[in-house]
Amino acid sequence: MTTSSESTACRTSNSLAACPPPRGRLVSQTSGSTDRPSRPKKARQTYMRENDLEGLPLSLDEFLAFCDGRREKIEVRLRELLGSES
């Protein structure tokens, strides 16, 4: 059992080796099965698709172009839903 001084030292230490892992948590939570995507991955994919975030670039250089394209997609979808022909 850790004392309060040990836990304070752990929070202020720059070394991860000085801190034991939290009790009750697994260090690695890999499922070992790669046949089916996990539910969180499916939920993330659905969220990305529904919010026009597919193709989100990893670099800042491409981000502005992505935002412009996303804005156009959202505008087209809103116009279709609202029945506006502008």
Image: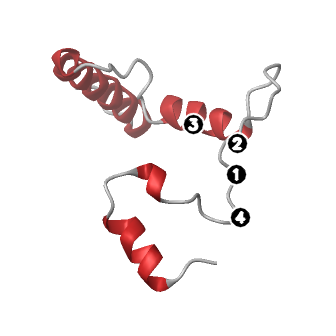
Cα separation between marks 2 and 1? 6 Å
Q: Which of the 4 image quarters holds residue 55? A: top left
Q: Amino acid at mark 2?
A: Gln
Where is mark 4, residue-wise?
A: 24
Q: Secondary structure at mark 1?
A: loop
Q: Is residue 45 left or right of residue 9?
A: right
* Residue position for label 1: 26
**Residue at left offset 43%, top offset 51%:** 16
Q: Residues within 10 Å of mark 4 (few under 14, many from 20)?
A: few
Determine which residue is flagged by label 2: 29
**Gap in Å between the C-alphas at discs 3 and 1?**
23 Å
| Pointer 3 local density, CA inside 10 Å: few below 14, some 14–19, many at least 20 | few
Residue nearer the viewer, 77 or 45 = 45
Amino acid tagged 1: Leu
Residue under label 3, please give it.
44
Residue in the picture at 31% in, 66% down? 12
| Residue visible at 74% across and 27% down in the picture | 37
Any mark on residue 6, and which? none
Does residue 25 appear left or right of residue 17 in this picture? right
